[in-house]
Structure formats: structure tokens, C-alpha cells
Image (cartoon, rainbow, N blue to C red):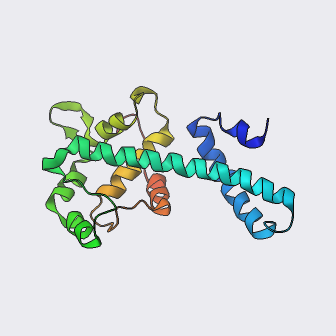
Amino acid sequence: MEYHEYFEGWDDKRWSSYYTKYIKSLVSFISITYLNYNIKFNILFRKFSKLLAKHRSLRGTIANRVRSAIFAVFGEQELPYIDTTFTPLEIKEWKDSEQLKNAHEKLYQCIEKDKEMTWCARIIQKVWPNFKKLTKEKISFSMALCQYMLNPKIESIKINDEEIRKIMKVNKVSKKY
């Protein structure tokens, strides 16, 4: 079994921590030091690049699911739809809107019809089919995406990995979110 085949069976939590610890720094090291130096390292680099691409793809898929869930949970009346194909002016107007500010304020408030659940929890529930068995990492990532997307002070709606990591570090995930 080759390394990339071994890693394909890993679950999300194990994969993300491994990526953070090893792959990201190793890919940078290999690309800078050995990319054109040795064929074996080129092969190794390609295998790690596949793992890196898989990780990015998974994050992108989750981000898209969170975006869709945000609009589905809040509905068109409370939060008009927007995506990255909109012009910068349209995005700025959306970020400056009262509807966005209201959605941002509601994020951790209980839903009127369901006093046991916050708006953020409802979004996460919609994203993850097995809501009861979520890892803290998935919860934290989903919460960070919600906060990033709905924060009127952040001008972009295109996900910035560094900003998401900062938000995740600040968030303390508990059973009740």
C-alpha cells in the first residue's frame, strides 16, 4: 500500500490534525529544497500534493455546505442570497445591510420556535447529517465559517483560511452552541 492510499481512509479529525502538523510544512520544504533535484522527491511531492488537494477540496465542500445552510436557515426574507460571483459593490452593500447585521446578532440567540437551539446550531445541524456525533473540530470550523460570513466588519465573503483559523482558535466549543 502506498502512502496516499493509506491516508485516503482516514476520518476528518485525524486527517486535519495530520495535515496541520506534517503535510503543509513538508510540502513547502520539498517544493523549495528538492523539487527539481531528485526524481524520488518529485514523486513524493506529487503524492503529498494529492493529499493537500484532497484536504482543500474537503474544506471547500464544507464551506459551500455551510453557506447554503446559512441562507436556508435564515431564509430570503431575513438574509438575501449572495455568492462570490457578485460584484464587489454588491458584496459591500450586502455586508452593510441591516439584514446581515440582524443575522450576525442572532447567530448565538435561541430560535423563537425552538428555545433549545440557537441559529448557529440549526445551521450546523443542516450541514452535518449526523448532528449528535460531531467532532469539536467540525463544530468549530462550521461556527468560524458562520461568524466569518455574517460578520459585517469582514468585507469579503470569499473564505480566507488564515482568518478562519484565527476565529477557530478564539472559539471555545461546548456542547451548547
Q: Position of residue 130 (x, y in %)?
A: 42, 27
From what the image shows, is residue 90 above or below residue 135? Answer: below
Q: Quadrant of residue 42?
A: bottom right
Q: The C terminus is located in which quarter?
A: top left
Q: Position of residue 33 (x, y in %)?
A: 80, 69
Q: Quadrant of residue 95?
A: bottom left
Q: Position of residue 83 (x, y in %)?
A: 31, 58
**Can residue 172 be seen at all in this image of the molecule?**
no
**Frontmost residue, 106 versus 176:** 106
Find the residue positioned furthest to the bottom: 89
The residue sitting at 25% across, 54% down in the picture is: 104
The residue sitting at 16% across, 56% down in the picture is: 99
Q: The N terminus is located in which quarter?
A: top right
**Can residue 47 be seen at all in this image of the molecule?**
yes
The residue sitting at 49% across, 35% down in the picture is: 135
From what the image shows, is residue 41 above or below residue 12? Answer: below
Q: Horizontally, is 33 left or right of 144 in the view?
A: right
Q: Position of residue 126 (x, y in %)?
A: 33, 35
**Frontmost residue, 177 versus 132:** 132
Number of callouts in the render?
A: 0
The residue sitting at 28% across, 46% down in the picture is: 70
